[in-house]
Structure formats: C-alpha cells, structure tokens
Amino acid sequence: MAKNFDQAYKLEICKRVVENKESVAVVAREVGIHENTIYGWVSRYRQNSNKPFVGSGRLAKSGGSNRNHGGQRQELRHTDTIKVNTDVLEEIKFRIDIAFTDDFGFDL
C-alpha cells in the first residue's frame, strides 16, 4: 500500500537534497523512502519551489500539459465501460422486442 506524506515533510526532504546538497541515497536510507520517490519530489520542487505539491501531494496541473493522470484514465475507462454496457443492454432489449413480437404478435 502506498504511503502518503504531507507537503511539509516532502519540502523538508527536498530542501535537504537541493539546498543542503545531501545525497538522495543518504536521505532515502535515513528516512526509509525509496530513492525514486525522492527524485520525483525533488524534480517537482525544482520546477516550482514555491508550491511543488498541491492538495494531497499530486502534481499541479500546468496550462499546456496534455498529461493524462491516473484518475482521469480511470474515469475514462469507467465511462467507456458504461457506454459498452449501455450498448449491450440496448441490443438485448432490441432482440427481446423482436422475439416477443414474433411469439405473441404485438410490440412491448
């Protein structure tokens, strides 16, 4: 399960790496966080040191970014699933209507 760290903690870690010139590997070992996680935080910190982490720690949306975040992909998949299910149900209803008309001579 993913751990969540508050913004202040992430900023503290980033400042140790960027401003104090501490090694990512050393900081990662000391705090027990994977190096790649810290590299990601530092990257965001360098892009916007005033407010690198927005809300729950997710990256702030930039104006020209076409990046598709996980939540958006999940929402799109969910929407696609609903569309497919709706199409399937329409087809089933159509076939039932035809079968009922053929068997009983009138529409539902």
Image (cartoon, rainbow, N blue to C red):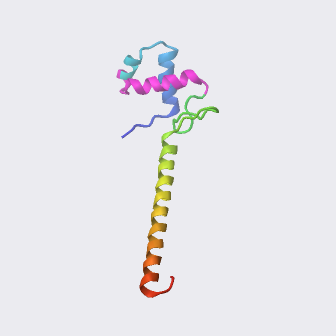
Q: Horizontal and vertical percent for residue 72?
A: 52, 44
Quarter containing the N terminus: top left
Which stretch is magenta? 29-50
Determine the residue located farthest toward the right in the rendered image. Answer: 63
Q: Horizontal and vertical percent for residue 61?
A: 59, 35
Q: Which secondary structure dominates the residues rendered in magenta? A: helix
Between 43 and 17, which is closer to the camera in this rendering? 43
Residue 71 versus residue 97 in the image, above or below: above
Q: Quadrant of residue 51?
A: top right
Q: Horizontal and vertical percent for residue 63?
A: 64, 33
Q: Please tell me which residue is depicted at 47% across the width and 49% down the height of the picture.
A: 77
**Left or right placement of residue 3 versus residue 80 in this view:** left
**Left or right placement of residue 64 versus residue 12 in this view:** right
Q: Please tell me which residue is depicted at 51% across the width and 16% down the height of the picture.
A: 18
Residue 64 versus residue 98 in the image, above or below: above
Q: Quadrant of residue 95?
A: bottom left
Asked if residue 51 lies in the magenta stretch, the reply is no
Q: Horizontal and vertical percent for residue 36?
A: 40, 25
